[in-house]
Image (spheres, rainbow, N blue to C red):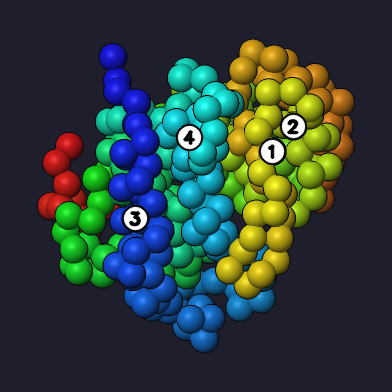
Amino acid sequence: MAAHFNDNDVDDFMDHALSSNASLYVVHEACGPFYTSKERARFGNDSSYGGITGSVRPYDVGRIARLLMTGRFKDSDTQLLSSDFLLKKHTSVFLDAGSGTGRPTFYFARLALRCSIGFDIDELQVSNSRACLNKLVQLDPSRFSSPISLFKQDALALDSLGPVTHAYCFIGYPLLAVKLARLALTSPQLKVICVVTLDNKWLTSAGLVDDKEVIALHSMKMSGGNSYRGAVIPLTEYRKRTIAAALAEEEESFTMAEGAVEPNPVNAQLELALECGPNQLDAGNWQQ
């Protein structure tokens, strides 16, 4: 049976990933960006790309990590997340969907997971995250305890999240909430979805949140100071039924939505599973 993380593991994560002067957060800030919007043309991107970028402050990443590791908030004995939904050592796969420059992917790679994955639709951001990964490994080869995979991917084109057990996503528009709900039903390995959102109504209409079995995270702040709502969503049988019912009502509007993307005809589950490992450039740093 795979082992769970304990309070000592949480303390180590907070210190090395988020809190100390040599933490991943501090070092990452000093590493990038390697490529700026002025260089976007070299990546073949439309210069008008305007995705929402930013990062949740370390304190709030810590709130999510503590819940996923122990099922509790700090200084609380109340078990909010049962053991079935917790991260497990060497077994769980973490994903940041819309990973930008890679912060959450790097943070969770501090833990001894099967893999920590990040993907983004913006190739420039993916290049930034890969360059930062190389720099972080050069500075301290022992910094990470999990393999890391960073690649370009449009979340709307996926039909499954494959081996992913715990997913994190910033929901910046309603169609993404609907897509994430669909993936919750087509990804058998997925146990928990963590979200930060501009509008909680998008999550409610997709069946992802209501007043049952969801851990609300209020005042999730970005580094620039903006505050959003967050939630940790265990994919219980009740939650899956709620999502299925909500999606049945949303079916027509989702199909007709402007900009909706048809599922990738390639078996996305297998493709993502193959990506679940170290980048080719860094393969020598990891033991499979």
Residue under label 2, please give it: 209
Residue 156: quadrant of the picture? top right
Residue 63 percent location from the top left of the image: 53, 46
Residues under numbered marks 2 and 1 in contact, where contact means CB atoms less than 8 Å apart: yes
Circle 1 Cα neighbour tier, 10 Å, few/some/many (<14 / 14–19 / ≥20): some
Residue under label 1, please give it: 216
Mark 1–mark 3 Cα distance, whole angstroms, equals 25 Å
Q: Which mark is residue 68?
A: 4
Residue type at mark 3 is Asp
Q: Which mark is residue 133?
A: none
Q: Say if 185 sits above or below 226 in the image.
A: above
> Does the rendering let one see residue 268?
no
**Judging from the image, what secondary structure is the residue with disc 4 in?**
helix
Residue under label 3, please give it: 15
Compare marks 3 and 4 and give the one earlier in the sequence.
Answer: 3
**Judging from the image, what secondary structure is the residue with disc 1 in?**
strand
Residue type at mark 4 is Leu
Q: Nearer the viewer, mark 3 or mark 2?
A: 3
Mark 4–mark 1 Cα distance, whole angstroms, equals 13 Å
Circle 4 Cα neighbour tier, 10 Å, few/some/many (<14 / 14–19 / ≥20): many
Residue 248 percent location from the top left of the image: 81, 22
Compare marks 4 and 2 and give the one earlier in the sequence.
Answer: 4
Residues under numbered marks 3 and 4 in contact, where contact means CB atoms less than 8 Å apart: no
Q: Say if 28 sits above or below 174 in the image.
A: below
